[in-house]
Amino acid sequence: MDQCNGVFDPEELSVLGCLYDSAVTALPPSMQNAENRTAIAKLILERTAAAQAQLGCLTNLLIAISPQG
């Protein structure tokens, strides 16, 4: 994910779509409503953004402490 504008590349979208589909399918049919689907989508996107931010911080740290940094 591009950290500046929140754009996902096609491969990331495919993976996120599979995660979403799996999560919705795991719910009992009575819980597969629009509200729960939206909550799942938001959760996946928020966690993906947080993981990307953590990866960015780790990358910056490794650059800072590297001998060539």
Image (spheres, rainbow, N blue to C red):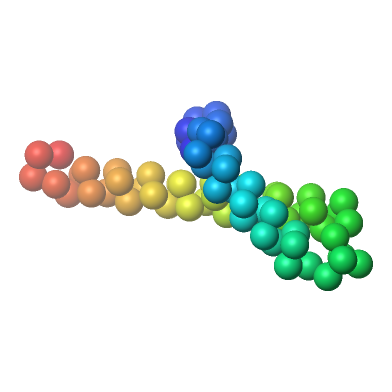
What residue appears at the point 46 percent right and 46 percent down from the top-left corner?
52
Q: Position of residue 43 (x, y in %)?
A: 67, 55
Does any portion of residue 7 appear in the rendered image? Answer: yes
Q: Position of residue 11 (x, y in %)?
A: 50, 39
Toward the left, the furthest residue is: 67
Q: Position of residue 20 (x, y in %)?
A: 67, 53
Q: Is residue 28 left or right of residue 7?
A: right
Task: Please tell me which residue lies in front, 28 or 63.
Answer: 28
The quadrant in which the C terminus is found is top left
What residue appears at the point 39 percent right and 49 percent down from the top-left corner?
55
What residue appears at the point 52 percent right and 41 percent down from the top-left corner?
12
Q: Position of residue 22 (x, y in %)?
A: 67, 60
Toward the right, the furthest residue is: 30
- Quadrant in the rendering for residue 36: bottom right
Task: Please tell me which residue lies in front, 25 or 1.
Answer: 25
Task: Please tell me which residue lies in front, 4 or 18.
Answer: 18
In the image, residue 43 above or below residue 4: below
Does any portion of residue 46 appear in the rendered image? Answer: no
